[in-house]
Amino acid sequence: MPDSLILLSYLCLIVVFQSIFGVGVLVLGTPFLLILDFNIVDIFFILLPISILTSLSNFLIMNFYNKISQKSTMRQLKKFFIICIPSIVIGLIILKFFQNYINFKILVSFVILFSVFLVIIKNKIKYKINFFRISILSIVGIIHGLTNSGGTLMSLALSTNNKKEYARYNITFLYLVLASFQYLITIIIFNSNFIFPYDKKIILTIIFGIFIGNILNNYIDNKKYKIAVNILAVLTSIILIYS
């Protein structure tokens, strides 16, 4: 088990990533804790509150600067509620009854690589975009409820044909909603208590990571953003495969 300094440093790093790309805490935190042999349900209760706090802070910062129109996000949210939330419930129910039979290192790795493949297919195959979005939201919900990694697919899909700030805003907001609902549903399904980060070191690390992430974001253009999102996805899966 790494010492607390290494854990806090890694936490800071993934908060920085989430502040720049909209995802990071769950996408990079889940495989890291799986490598350390944490139980997948325990990982949910450790990382989801941190992810929610990070996304909420970044969303408020972006709204304060008022750089992005909220209309498109509200349209996305309607589809999100109708399709994605029920899918999260399905994923969590599968997790509750089959967690002892699933190799989550392999599954999470496969999910991330499959996410990259789906985005490539989206760019090459011409079919109704609505079908693609509905499929993506359904898959995101089930995968996120089961593995904590649905945000990878969401970030890849939303960043493909969109400008950086638009993609970042939408990913941050939808990921905030996704993680919040997942956390509440997880508490209900697994009969747990509501837990939120209370350790001062953790809170200060999150604040510092958000601050650094928002500064670094100013130096990343559209092209670098899209490349980095894909690298982030592939890197996560490689770490899991060789763990």
Image (cartoon, helix red, strand yellow):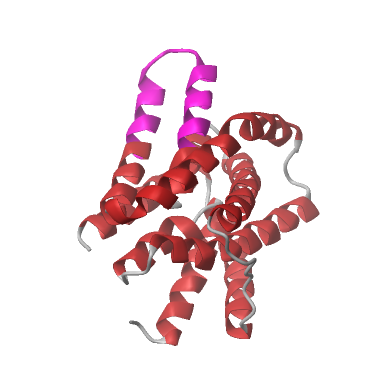
- Residue ID at (63%, 54%): 184
Q: Could you tell whether 67 is left or right of 86 in the image? A: right
Which residue occupies the foreground of this view, 131 or 126?
131
Say whether residue 15 is left or right of residue 52. Answer: left
Above or below: residue 176 compared with residue 167: below
The image shows residue 11, relative to residue 105, as above or below, that is below
Q: Choose between 177 and 223: the one closer to the eye.
A: 177
Residue 190: give x, y in percent of width and height. 53, 57
Q: Going by the image, does 1 lie left or right of 200?
A: left
Residue 224 seen in the current view: no
Which residue occupies the extreme top position in the image? 127
* Residue 120 is inside the magenta segment: yes
Instruction: Using the rendered view, name the quadrant where residue 18 is placed.
Output: bottom right
Main secondary structure found in the magenta portion? helix
Extreme residue in the left direction: 242
Quadrant of the frame with the N terminus: bottom left
Which of the two residues, 87 or 29, is positioned nearer the viewer here? Answer: 87
Quarter the C terminus occupies:
bottom left
Magenta span of residues:
116-140
Q: For the point 75% across and 37% down, which residue is it?
A: 69
